[in-house]
Amino acid sequence: MADADLAFAPATEQLRLLEAGRISACDLLELYLDRVDRFNPTYNLVVAEDRDRARKTAAEIDRRRAEGRTLGPLAGLPITIKDSFEVTGMPTTCGLEQLRDHRPEADADAVALLREAGANIFGKTNLPAGASDWQSFNPVYGMSRNPWNPGHTVGGSSGGAAGAVSAGLTAFELGSDIGGSIRIPAHFCGVFGHKSTYGLVPLRGHIPPPPGMLSQPELGVAGPIARSAKDLALLLSIMGSPLPPARRESLRDFRIGVWMGDGAYRVDGAYRRALEDHIAALRKAGATIAEVSLPVDPQQSYETYLQVLFAIVGAPAPQEADAFERLADRDETGIAAKLARYMRSSLGDWFRLAEVRAQLFRSWAGFFQDYDVLLCPAVPVVAFEHMAEGSGVHSDQLFRRVSIDGQPAPYLDFTWQGLALVANLPATVMPTGRFVDGLPAGLQIIGPYGEDLTTIRFADLAAEAAGGFTPPPALR
């Protein structure tokens, strides 16, 4: 296998080659380190490294494998980790100047599980400051660039992670998602990303919240980013609690709903056509797909998600609410006033939201009695050109605009990514093999609570039938 083919191979294929003795852990690590040296200066995806430790670990894995010792299920895979997760031996900054020199004394829990399984961590990947943007730039490490077009963003907040997987700089990645932060970068970079069921994967050691805190915020989850759906399933089995098997094993047996939005849930026409082409190919392959209505009021779901999210964001940072209030008179969209109000949610508001969400949970559970998965866009657009104004805090993003069918639309649009988040549902984004102006078009697959393997299995079958990951031409 040529080096480029090996670099872009799924993690499960790399493991097969390692276990068969066809490649060594040392050689695989050096392949990725060489690619980082060649390509990272252009794309700025990997921002910290611990090569000495990684080389010692790879040599030890090769020695133990040669002796016939029992090894972990990920033994020898060289990986990077999003810089919001604490990793010993390297700084964990979350892109924040005040954490530039933060060196944790212990791995984040999810990182520890990967390391115990034999993954060989050699680097950290870039993200927005405070993990709070849909681009990946910060004052510590600068801007990351998309492997499909360096003039466009990798997304955020797991942007460096998805970019590194897409660019063939790592075997797989660990991301996190409270506002689409796994799924948006996966869509923008043309890889697989899984937002897990809330609470499935441990988040202790993730920033935010600040270092040392033990509680897990509402909505926030961790999950894998990879080049195949089979990789996602393997990684989730290592990081998460035991899961029920996928509901279906063949594409023909899946009960599939599709919803392309209305009202606030907008999608650019070219992106929509790319998804519809992929869905048509699935139908041709034998899938039964029905256009459906949501089991919840889409606008209520959206507003509930916004209020929960910005109550979480605003509680430790009241100055953000003040900033939005100061901008409200200049904001024709009304977003500034709304978010300032949501950031000041009271305990009574929080209890009311808990009841609204409980009703949403029940409605989605009813929907998934009739359907196994819901297909929809990941966000309204494909990867856009860099917008680096401001520090990256939410109030600095207020006046940014994306283009939907040639018309400016608010950057702070949380519709599509909030559907699964507010209801604690698992959601997988997969590459479709379709492109808009040379940029990947990803499909979001939402599934029933606690049934993560159902969306992942569907993604695997859909990729086989209608197209999935392809490497960026410039990185071959």
Image (cartoon, rainbow, N blue to C red):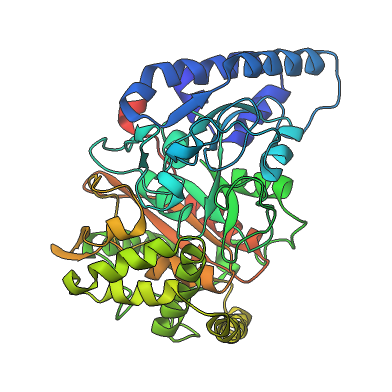
Whether residue 63 is visible to the viewer of this picture, yes or no, is: yes
Q: Position of residue 239 (x, y in %)?
A: 70, 47
Residue 345 to residue 102: above or below:
below
Q: How many marks?
A: 0
Residue 89 to residue 312: above or below:
above
Instruction: Please give the name of the residue rendered at 57% of the width and 77% of the height, measured from the top-left corner.
Output: 371
Instruction: Please give the name of the residue rendered at 28% of the width and 56% of the height, measured from the top-left corner.
Output: 396
Instruction: Please give the name of the residue rendered at 85% of the width and 18% of the height, measured from the top-left corner.
Output: 68
| Image quarter of residue 320 | bottom left
| Image quarter of residue 293 | bottom left
Left or right: 137 in relation to 356: left
Residue 85 to residue 274: above or below:
above
From the image, which quarter does the C terminus lie in? top left
Q: Position of residue 383 (x, y in %)?
A: 29, 49
Instruction: Please give the name of the residue rendered at 47% of the width and 72% of the height, measured from the top-left corner.
Output: 419
Q: Position of residue 297 (x, y in %)?
A: 44, 86
Q: Position of residue 110 (x, y in %)?
A: 68, 44
Whether residue 279 is visible to the viewer of this picture, yes or no, is: no
